[in-house]
Image: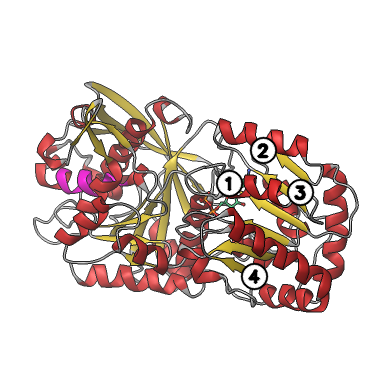
Amino acid sequence: MPVLLKKHGFHTADSAKEGARSGSKHAMRVLFVTSEIATLYKRGGLADVSYALPVALSQLGVNISVAMPYYESVTTKGVTCVGQLALDYDRRRELVFVFRALLPHSHVRAYLFRHPLLNNYDDLHIADRFAFFSKAVAQLSLYSEEMLGGPYDIIHCNDWHTALIPLLIGEQSKVGYRERPRPLSAAPKALAGGETIQSKRVKTILTVHNLLYQGETGSSITLKLGFPKPLFHPFMTPLGRAVRLLTEGFEYADKVTTVSPTYAKEIAAGKHGKRVVEVFSRRKDRMIGILNGLDSKLWDPRNDPSLPVHYDASTVVSAKRVIKAQLRKALRLPESEAPLFGFVGRLESRQKGLDLIARVIKKLAGEAYQLVLLGTGQKKLVALFERLAAEHKNVVFVHTFDERLARRIYAGSDVMLVPSKFEPCGLTQLIAMRYGTLPLVRKTGGLADTVHDGKTGFVFTPYTSTALADKMKEAIALYHEKPARFEAMTAHVMGLDFSWQHQVKEYLALYQSLLKSS
Ligand code: ADP
């Protein structure tokens, strides 16, 4: 039986203050749970979204907080411990400390969960460790009155890491954890006669940012969590019975969304596996695709501190010249009249089209272009691109995660390559456009929704190195032969609005429809 042990520094006025700030008397309360948040800890696009979407929602008046593990590498100011949770995991009682901070440059509260199992992202048994985190979040939601300033209406989960929460929450409310000792001061006064926080069940949303990663683990996780086995949907693997945390989320979440309309359609058509289609054929609803946006303050070439000069659409041409020259110098690329192509992303052979890039480097040897690749990931790809960079003096590969360099590449390149095999949404093409750099993408998922061939970038369709090479040649030709057209496209894409301003309203409408259906 879990118990609330203690609470520290809890300000009951939090929610009231937040409501007042937003100007709404009864702002809906949402807890957004994720494995990464830009400004605290970032591995990829999920972190960008997990920062920008809650901030945009809070600006619309939603009383939203975010929850994430308190990794050792997270350094943030003004952190307060709000309490401790005791929970049973793997037949032991574990203590999780919950801290609160504000997300930088925002009014959004972040709850950070500290426990040795959550110290690092990269480690063994990662699925089990996120199942543990999910249990802690589910349990915290029981104590929302005491530790979070009031009960939550919605828990918004993201990707496999937190996809178990809908199951855990539903089950906890059923098995009546309310017999736990509760401090008198924390009695649920606000709720009507006999009703408890738990019986007023919180609604859950699961957003899938990438179906490739499903959090597969042995079915012993059910024992470790102490939840009845029949609740899960195990399947056989050569190593024994296993469960996938993501698909458990599909089974139990009240709503499932993904990050672009085209990716949602592809999923429904079975292009990303039959299992999801199967689950949705049993559910009465469908997966909704809401396009990701970009935080226009965090990504702004007019004041990006990583850039040597700042610019807007009217000054992009001259600014880019300066930034490109500095970038070439830093990367030891020779000064050149040739266009500079960039790639920033995870080295993931199943998704990011890196096999195409590798073949194209050989195919386009002798062509007048330069290429800089920044990325971390699979070892075989690191070795491949190190070799290719050593063999081709127009190619540089930087194997690190470096936000500052990434921003200089977005600003200093002429074209950003995003030749993904599939791409749920993709942010690199959006960032490129914001920084006045034309994206060259494959027509899939969110790339298909956001880039238009010949207007806002370059788009190819067949997943072949020939198709990629042909598009790159087209971009190189345009750059040399029609510089005025190239520059006009550059200025045009800078004027496009990919901020969250529009899509955030779709999330708000979704939240409202969920609450109405209570
Ligand atoms: P994904 O989420 O599949 O990794 P996205 O295009 O949605 O891809 O988002 C990737 C985000 O991660 C972008 O903000 C990109 O700039 C950033 N990023 C990826 N790799 C690196 C790296 N090596 N250094 C700095 N930023 C990176």
Q: Which residue is mark 3?
A: 365
Q: Secondary structure at mark 1?
A: helix
Q: Which residue is mark 2?
A: 385
Mark number displayed over residue 51: none
- Secondary-structure class at tag 3: loop
Depth order, front residue of 138/282:
282
Q: Is residue 169 magenta?
A: yes
What secondary structure do most residues of the magenta stretch adopt?
helix
Question: Is the residue under label 4 in contact with that under label 1 (CB below 8 Å)?
Answer: no
The Cα–Cα distance between marks 3 and 2, rounded to whole angstroms, is 15 Å
Closest to the camera, between mark 1 and mark 3, is 3
Region rendered in magenta: 163-171
Cβ of disc 2 within 8 Å of ligand 1? no
Q: Label 1 sits on what residue type?
A: Leu
Mark 4 = which residue? 457
Q: Residue furthest right?
A: 335
Which of discs 1 and 4 lies nearer the camera? The answer is: 1
Residue 193 lies, in percent from the top left, at: 9, 59
Residue at the spot 87% in from the left edge and 68% down from the top edge: 318
Q: Which residue has dot 1 on it? A: 354
N-terminal of the two: label 3 or label 2?
3
Q: Amino acid at mark 3?
A: Ala
**What's the residue type where badge 2 is placed?**
Phe
Quadrant in the picture for the C terminus: bottom left
Judging from the image, what secondary structure is the residue with disc 4 in?
loop
Which amino acid type corresponds to the residue marked 4 in the rendered image? Gly
Q: Nearer the viewer, mark 4 or mark 3?
A: 3
Which label's residue is closer to the chain start, 1 or 2? Answer: 1
